[in-house]
Amino acid sequence: MRGTPASDALLHDDAANMREVTEELQSTDPRRRPQPEEGPLTIIYEDDWMLVADKPAGVVVHPTYKNTSGTLLNAVLWRVRERPGSQPGILTRLDKDTSGLVVIALTPDVHATMQKDAAAGRTTKHYLAVVVGSPEPTQGAIVLPLARDSADRRRVVVTPDGASCETRYHVLSTSEGRSLVRCELITGRTHQIRVHLAARGWPVLGDRVYGEPDARIARQALHAWRVSLPHPITRQTVAFEAPIPADMGQFCEGV
């Protein structure tokens, strides 16, 4: 069953972004293919089939027309450059100014398996967000349809004809007009957590697109904290956690 034009557009954009990266990796044209580049890379887990990295805020996940080098994928390609058959594929994308876990398959077959697991709901992703205000109720689900803003396609908006999206949340603490919130992505659309929280009146602290800048933090206070998923080969559940970065640590005491 097809959705509305707006919802199809958002789904198409998300799928197209991943397809574009895959096509570039497979391209025989060296001008299109992302190149290995030596660079900083914090590894949480690594084996012959997958890699989990802790991405700092300010780093782009994969090359784009604006960021052709210096990305996380460039550094991963450098790390696996001497492994025959390696063709890294990003499984969990993050915005440039969101920190935390990025899961990377190291071969196309593994990438396909992990994508199927994610589509079947076998991958769990938890984020930490510092938001403005005190969410009420203190836990629940935000189910709001999202689509690209027709006036500015860099933005995502809530609209009745958007793609169905769900974010579950649980307030961990509240202090001085802000709250620390754990979010679980049930769907995984572009900017989903940021837009959902802002739509409920609790924008992410420091979010310049869907909230307001804040002198206490130079980016949106959003961190991809925990991921669990079936290992693509052993099928055993594996779980990973990225330490809370220093710029968010001031808001996350006791976590």
Image: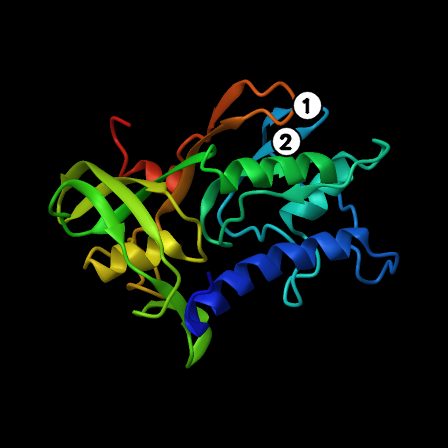
Q: Is residue 134 above or below residue 234?
A: below
Mark 2–mark 1 Cα distance, whole angstroms, equals: 7 Å
Give the numbered dot on residue 51.
Answer: 2
Q: Nearer the viewer, residue 168 or 43?
A: 168
Q: Nearer the viewer, residue 242 or 176?
A: 242
Amino acid type of the residue tagged 2 in the rendering: Leu
Pointer 1: what residue? Answer: 47
Disc 2 and disc 1 in contact, CB within 8 angstroms = yes
The tally of labels here is 2
- Viewer-proximal residue among 153 and 132: 153
Q: Considering depth in this image, is 87 or 45 the residue closer to the camera?
A: 87
Write the residue at 39% across / 61% down. Answer: 163
SS class, disc 1:
loop
Q: Residue at x 53, y 59 (%)?
A: 14
Image-based side of 140 in relation to 107, left or right: left
**Is 72 on the left-hand or right-hand side of 224?**
right
- Callout 2: helix, strand or loop? strand
Residue type, numbered disc 1: Asp
**Side of 153 where 70 appears, left or right:** right
Q: Is residue 40 visible?
A: no
Location of residue 3 with respect to 127 vertically, above or below? below
Q: Residue at x 41, y 70 (%)?
A: 4
Q: Position of residue 96 (x, y in %)?
A: 51, 54
Dot 1 surroundings within 10 Å: few (below 14), some, or many (20 or more)? few
